[in-house]
Image (tube, rainbow, N blue to C red):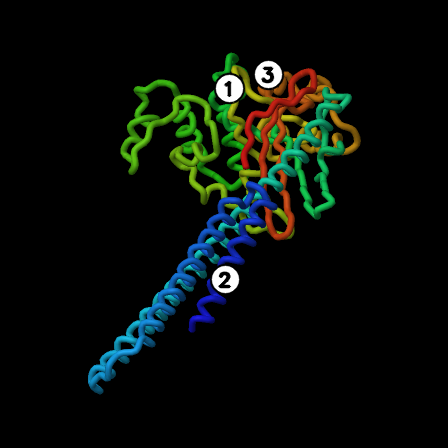
Amino acid sequence: MSLLLAVLGGLCLFISLLTALVSGIYGQRWAVSLWTFSAAYLIGGIVLLGTRQLLILLMRHRRVSRPAEPVRSRSRRRRRSGFVLVVVLVVLAAISLLIVRAQVSARAALRVEEAALRQRHLRNALAEAVFAVMREFADKEDISVDHLREPWVRDREFEWPDETGVTVRVTDENRFFDVNNVHVLTDRADRTPAGRILMDIMTQCGDFMPVARVEALKAWMDSDPADFRGTNRYMEQSPPYRASGTWLTSWRELLLVDGFDRSYFERRPRNRFPREFEADILDHITLLPVPRTRPIPVNINTASREVLLGILGYDRERLVHYILAAREEEPFRSVDGLLAMADEQALQDVDGYLDVKSEFFTLEARAYAKGETARLRVLTRRAGDGTLRILQWTL
C-alpha cells in the first residue's frame, strides 16, 4: 500500500509539473484551465504522499514491542487497523473523484474555448468576404442602372487554405416594395397611395381581405396618440405595449401589428406550375428601417411581376408584361421612356414609385469550417457617388 501511494503521489506531481509547463507553451489562451488542472493534480499528489507518511507512522507504531496482550485486546486492535484502512481507501476514492472531475472540467473548458476560437475565426472570415463584395460594389463604374445580368446577382464563394469557406449572396432590396412607404404622406392627390399598392400586392399573395391589415399598419405608424386602434387596443394585450407612432424598425415589430403574425408570412408549398394568387408575400415586400420624406422607389429592372402590377395597377397588365420581356433584352436606363408608352394617368399614379437603379442592398454571408457554421446579414445603402454605408450588421 505504501509503495502504491508513493507511485500515485509521484505521478500526480509529475502530471502537475507537466501541465504547468504546457500552460507556459500555449500562453494565455488556455492558461486558466491548464493552471486549474495543474493545481488539482498538485493537491492530489500532496494528499497521497501525506497519506503514505501517515500510514508508515501507523505501521511503525504497530511494530513497537509491547507486553503480551489478551486475545480480546489483539482482536480490538485488528479492528482499529481495518477501520484505518477503510478510511484511507475512502480518502483515496474521494481524491480520485476530485482529480477526475478537475480533468473533465478542464477538458470541457478547453472545448468551449476552442469552439469560441473557431466562431471568432468564422466571423472574421465572414467580415472579410462581405467587405470584399462591398469593395466590388464601390468599384462599379456605372451606378445609374442596376439589373439582373450583373455579376453581383450571382453568389460569391470564398475559400481559405484552412478549408474555411464563405458564400455571399446579394439581394437588391429595391426589387421589393417597402412596407414603410405606408408611413409617407402623399403630397399629391393624384398619386396612388402606398397603402393601396401594398393591398394590391397582398391580394396577389392570396390575402383577399388586406384592408384591415393595412389600416392597422397605418394606425401603428400614426403619431396621433388619440387613435384608439393604434394605442388602446395594444394596451389590452398581455403583456401590454404601445404603438410606435412612426416607421417600423424591424420585422419583429411588424409582428406586433394587429393581423400580422408568423403564420401570415409562412411560405406555401410550391406547385410545379405557380398559379394566380399563390405568391409568397416575403418575395415581394421588404422593410427598410430608415426615415424618409418620400417613398423609396422600386427598380423596374429587378422587380417581380407582382410588385409591378401592384404599382401600375391590374388595368396595365400589358405594360407589365412588356417591362418583363424588354428588360431581358436590355435593361431600362430611364423611367421616362417607359412611361411615355403609358397614358397620362399612369404618369401621375406612379410618380416617385419607379426607378432604374437601386439604393439598398442586403448581403447575406454563410461561413463553414470543420462542422462549424456562422451567418452574417448586412444591410447597406449606396450613396450617389457609389460608396456603401452599413445600416445594419446582424450576426
Q: Secondary structure at mark 3?
A: helix
Q: Position of residue 282 (x, y in %)?
A: 55, 38
Residue at the image position 62 percent from the left and 41 percent from the top:
121
Q: Amino acid at mark 1?
A: Pro
> Does residue 187 sit above or below 148 in this rendering?
above
Can you tell which quarter of the image residue 333 is in?
Answer: top right
Q: Depth check: 373 or 141 in front?
A: 373
Q: Amino acid at mark 2?
A: Gly
Viewer-nearest of discs 3 and 2: 2
The residue to which callout 1 is attached is: 291
Residue at the image position 64 percent from the left and 16 percent from the top:
344
Give the side of residue 195 with respect to residue 80, left or right: right
Give the side of residue 378 with respect to residue 129, left or right: left
Asked if one can make out residue 267 in the rendered structure from this viewpoint, the answer is yes
> Does residue 282 sit above or below 180 in this rendering?
below
Q: Position of residue 177 (x, y in %)?
A: 57, 29
Residue at the image position 46 percent from the left and 27 percent from the top:
248
Mark 1 crowd level (few <14, some 14–19, many ≥20, 10 Å Cα): some
Q: Depth check: 182 or 241 in front?
A: 241
Q: Position of residue 268 (x, y in %)?
A: 54, 48
Q: CA distance from mark 1 to mark 2?
A: 71 Å
Q: Depth check: 195 or 292 in front?
A: 292
Q: Earlier in the sequence, mark 1 or mark 3?
A: 1
Give the numbered dot on residue 24.
Answer: none
The residue to which callout 2 is attached is: 10
The residue to which callout 3 is attached is: 348
Viewer-nearest of discs 1 and 2: 2
Can you tell which quarter of the image residue 205 is in?
Answer: top right
Q: Secondary structure at mark 2?
A: helix
Q: Amino acid at mark 3?
A: Gln
